[in-house]
Amino acid sequence: EVQLLESGGGLVQPGGSLRLSCAASGFSFSSYAMSWVRQAPGKGLEWVSTISGSGGTTYYADSVKGRFTISRDNSKNTLYLQMNSLRAEDTAVYYCAKDRLAARPSYVGDWGQGTLVTVSS
Amino acid sequence: EIVMTQSPATLSVSPGERATLSCRASQSVSSNLAWYQQKPGQAPRLLIYGASTRATAIPARFSGSGSGTEFTLTISSLQSEDLAVYYCQQYNNWPPITFGQGTRLEIK
């Protein structure tokens, strides 16, 4: 059974930093691209970033490019999202997502339960 | 960026009736279209990929159709547990991956 467990969310001041983690189990982690998708309170889904299975290729939404960095440690089956220069509009539940392909963004077969990030003074 | 537009924003259907949800892409996405269901307080769940292929363990009352720019998700006989928000997502042209704004399905 695929399990994705996010951690690292919380309250942070504007301009601050936070690192999210996603511990994965139940599948061959390095064989799949992984993504972060967020959902602001009461709003729809927004794709944030994807990393290939090898970790060699990354993709970002324009809204986070230059501020967020996605990475993975295949030896630890863990996905990360380093978030810097946080803004109020980054407030959202952040979902860890397992893509269906190895090398590029596609559709999400499995989702974590999400971790809430609140950016506020 | 491909814009995905879902209609209607809210749909109210009686149990046992058919529900038809629409999704339109601003340019062709071929059949690279997925549908997700998000129940209140839960993470999304994959329903359909490739525009018409049901994901594992998805009941047969859920079906998807369409290609190019026009897509439909049909729930043939609505059950009370189908109360949710439904999102379409294109994965043909990226980045970015884009989602529709969602259709809220209410049970009459």
Image (spheres, coloured by chain):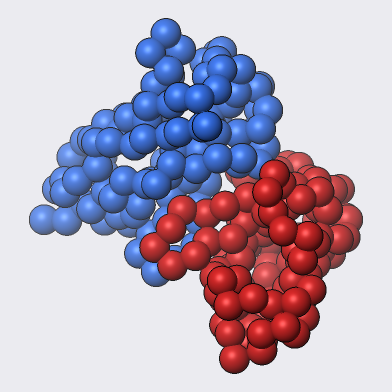
Colour of chain A, in one word, is blue
In the rendered structure, the answer to whether residue A103 lies left or right of residue A37 reads right
At 43% from the left and 18% from the top, the residue drawn is A77
Residue name at image x 46 percent, y 12 percent: A74
Please tell me whether residue A56 is drawn above or below residue B65 in the rendered image: above
In percent of width and height, residue A119 lies at: 21, 52
| Residue B44 in view, yes or no | yes
Question: Residue B5 at x, y = what percent?
Answer: 68, 68
Q: Is residue B40 left or right of residue B49?
A: left
Residue B106 falls in which quadrant of the image? bottom right
- Residue A59 % position (x, y): 55, 30
Q: Is A115 located above or below residue B16 in the figure?
A: above
The residue drawn where x is 63% and y is 50% is B46
Residue at 51%, 32% (x, y): give it.
A2
State the count of labels: 0
For the colour red, the matching chain is B
Residue B10 rendering spot, x and y as whole percentages: 59, 82
Residue B95 visible in this rendered orientation of the protein: no
Whether residue A112 sits left or right of residue B55 in the image: it is: left
